[in-house]
Image (cartoon, grey):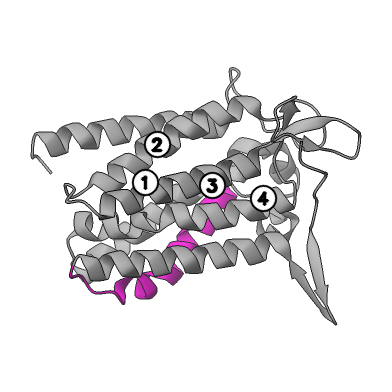
Amino acid sequence: MIPAVELQTVQLGPVTIYVWGLMVALGILAGAKASEWMLRQRGLDPKFVWDALGWIVLGAFIFARFFHAVFYDPATYLARPIEIFAIWHGGLSITGGFIGALLAALWFMRRRRVDPLSYADAIIFGLPLGTFIGRLGCFLTNMHPGVPTDFFLGMLHADGVVRHNLGLYLSFDGLLLFLAFLFMAGRKVRQGSYLVVFLIWYGVVRFGLDFLRAREGAIVDERYLGFTPAQYGSVLMVAAGIWLFIRFRQKKL
């Protein structure tokens, strides 16, 4: 059992640092650095990731906020539409973030007239590392409590209930996937392999873990026919990964 943790801010003199925001920022930078390394390994322009980063982050945040408003808390935003701009109040969907980042990256690659598959693979390479670090912010702020459990990684809450902590599990998942990517980097893998592995791995793990999310309390995800919006997104990710794998095997991409 993990003792109760909820570290929202850190005070450094007059400066208040928001832990979640700090970890997300560190995750973005670490992921970009890993992608830069992969671009060098593949003989591609290593500066590309830094040129594209601002657009990718912007696309990710816009779509993450939009998806949260539409699928997770529509009543709040219909009642107070201006609230959609108050991102400091929280509320981002990582599924929407992935879609926004992908669209922004594709737009930027087309603008630069580079081979999408080669660069997409390198960009995806750093994503699990960024997820690992960013999700630590979710863990430290206790952003995603789960159902009660007696699992040894369960976290004790202030009400005395031990619950799964989805932020911790998703952080571990990001670390494991990044280690798998490092293993793949030491071998000659087909172009597009990182993209396929990410889509299928993340989709399967996220679909399963969302069954552990809390169904009562202050932080509860909206469900449609018993599934969270992220689970529907996960199914689409796995389907896309399988489709790409088949197309690559047929050498049609």
Work out whether residue 115 can be spotted.
Answer: yes
Question: What amino acid is found at the position of numbered circle 2 in the picture?
Answer: Trp
Task: Please tell me whether residue 253 is drawn above or below residue 15 in the rendered image.
Answer: above
Q: Which mark is residue 201?
A: 2
Task: Please tell me whether residue 94 is drawn above or below residue 32 in the rendered image.
Answer: above
Instruction: Answer whether residue 233 is magenta in the image.
Output: no
Q: Secondary structure at mark 3?
A: helix
Distance from Cα at disc 4 to Cα at disc 3:
12 Å
Q: Nearer the viewer, mark 3 or mark 1?
A: 1
Give whichever of 1, 40 is nearer the camera: 1
Work out whether residue 62 can be spotted.
Answer: no
Highlighted magenta segment, given as a residue range: 43-66
Q: Is residue 33 left or right of residue 183?
A: right
Instruction: Answer whether residue 63 is magenta in the image.
Output: yes
Q: Residue 253: give x, y in percent of width and height.
A: 13, 44
Q: Secondary structure at mark 1?
A: helix
Label 3 packing within 10 angstroms: few (<14), some (14-19), many (20+): some
Give whichever of 169, 1 is nearer the camera: 1
Q: Nearer the viewer, mark 2 or mark 1?
A: 1
Q: Is residue 92 left or right of residue 49?
A: right
Most prominent secondary structure in the magenta stretch? helix
Task: Residue at 31% x, 35% y: name it.
Answer: 240
Q: Nearer the viewer, mark 1 or mark 4?
A: 1
Q: Which mark is residue 180?
A: 1
Q: Seen from this angle, which residue lies furthest left?
A: 251
